[in-house]
Amino acid sequence: MSMPAPTLSTDPRGAIFITPALFADMDEWHRVAAEIRRDEPVMRVEADGWPAFWAITTHEDVFDVSRRSDVFWNTEKSAPGPDIQYDLMQAMGIEMPRTLVHIHGDTHQKLRNITNDWFRPAAVKKLQPTIESIADEYVEKLVDMGGECDLAADLAVPFTLRVIMSIFGVPETDERLMLELTQGMFGAADPEFMGDFADPLASVTNSINKFESYFDELTASRRANPTGDLATVIANGTVDDEFMGERERLWYYIIVATAGHDTTSFAFSGGMEQLLRNQDQLRALQADPSLTGNAAEEMIRWTSPVRSFFRWAQEDTEVGGVPIAAGDVVLTSYPSANRDEKVFAEPDRFDITRPDANKLLSFGLGMHYCLGSQVARREVRTLLEKVLARVDTIELAGEPQFTGAHFVSGVKHLPVSYTLR
Ligand code: HEM
C-alpha cells in the first residue's frame, strides 16, 4: 500500500510537492516545476489531509527563507507529511521527533555544537583514507559481480551505509539492520521498502523502536570505553555542562544515521545515471580525474535527494513579494531551486564542467545547513573516481527506477553492464 495521492483545491500542479508517486518520474516533475517557477513561484497549495503551505520554488526565495531562520522556524513537523501522520502519532502516544532539523534557536545551536567540530572540513579530511578503503572494497566487488550489477542497490547503498557506520564506529555486521531501519523511516512511502508493515506509520514506529535499543547499547559501551568515533562524541556530549538527555541523544543518532545514508547514495546513483546517459562526459571524466570534484557537485545539484522541508513563519512577512502571515507554513523545494534558470545556465542540462554547479542548494543553507555536506561530497567524489578508474566501459543495461517518496528519494535501481580495465 502506498500513500494515497492528495486532492488539491488549489492549482493541481502543486501536487508535485507532496505526491510520492510523482517523484518516480523526475523529468516530468521538473517540467511541471519549471512552469510553477514561471507562473506562480511562491505557490499556495491546499490539499486534502495536508497543512496548507506556500511552495517556495526559486533559488532566490529558497535562499531567503533558509537564511531568515529568525522568522522561519523549524518545528517538530519539519519533514513535510500529511496531518494524519502526526495525528496518528499523537493518538498512539508516540513522541514527536526532536532531531536537529526539528528544533530551533538556542537549543538547536547547543546540540549542534556537540558535533560541529567533528564535521568541520579539516576533521572530515581525516576520514578520507577510511572512505577510500571502503570505496576500494566495494569497487572490487565489481570483479565478483562479473560484468553486470545494480549500481544503486549493489554498490551505492552498501557503500554509503558502510561509511556512515564506520564514522559512528559500529561494526559491519550491523549494516543490514541499519539499512532496514533507514528505509523504514525515509523510504516509508515506497512500497518496496515497507517490509512486513502494512502502513507507513507502522514502519516508521517500528524503525524508531529498533533504533532505540540499538543505540542505547552503543551509548553504554562508548561511555565505558570511549574511542575517537562519532558515537563516543554523541554518547558523551554535554549541554550546559550536563550530558544531553537520553531522548536528545537518541534523536541525534537517528538524524545522523538516517540523513547521512540514503541521501548520499541517491546523489551517487542519480548522478551516475546521467553519466551513463552522457557517455562523452563519462569518458572525459575517465580521461581527466581532476574533473571529479565539479562532477560530484553537479551530481548533487542534479539529484537534490532531499526534496523539501517545512518552515513556520513566526511573524507577518513576505517572500518573493508574496505576503506570508504569521503561522503560515512554507515548503523549500530544493530540486526546483537547483534548476532555476535565473541562476543555472541551461539548468536541465547535466554538465560536469558547469561553472555554476557550486551554487547548488541541495544541502540547504543557514543554521540548519547540512552537517554532513563535507562527508557527502567526499563520498560521492571518492566512489566516482574509484569506479571510473576500475571500469573500461560502463553502460545502462535497463531502465533506472526511482523511489516514489516525497521527502528523500532518487534512483533506487540502476542496472548496468561493464567491462573492467
Ligand atoms: C548528498 C547527500 C546529502 C544531502 C542532499 C543532504 C541534505 C540535507 C538538507 C537539505 C538538510 C537541511 C538543511 C536546511 O534545513 O537548511 C540537511 C541537514 C542535515 N544533514 Fe544532510 N544531506 C546529505 C548528506 C548528509 C550526511 C552524509 C550526513 C551525516 C554524515 C548528513 C547529516 C545531516 C544533519 C545532521 C542535518 C541536520 C542539521 C541541522 O538541522 O542542524 N547529511 N541535509
Image (cartoon, helix red, strand yellow):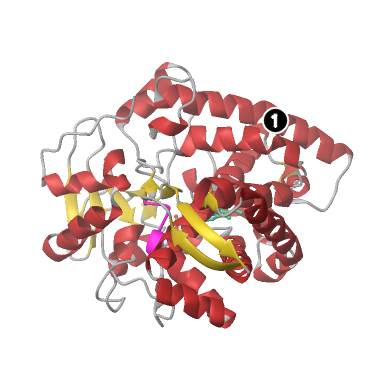
Q: Which residue is mark 1?
A: 214
Q: Quadrant of the C terminus?
A: bottom right
Depth check, front residue: 103 or 227? 227
In the visual, does 332 lie left or right of 246?
left
| Whole-percent x, y for residue 378 in the image | 61, 66
In the visual, does 236 lie left or right of 225?
left
- In the rendered image of this protein, does residue 9 appear above or below residue 33? above
Image quadrant in which you'd find residue 190: top left
Residue 55 falls within the magenta-colored stretch: no
Query: Residue at 16% of width from left, 34% of height from top?
Result: 7
Query: Residue at 53% of width from left, 55% of height from top?
Result: 264
In the visual, does 349 lie left or right of 300?
left
Image quadrant in which you'd find residue 322: bottom left
Depth check, front residue: 266 or 53? 266
Depth check, front residue: 22 or 282? 282
What amino acid does circle 1 point to? Tyr
Q: Quadrant of the N terminus?
A: top left
Is any part of residue 72 visible from this angle?
yes
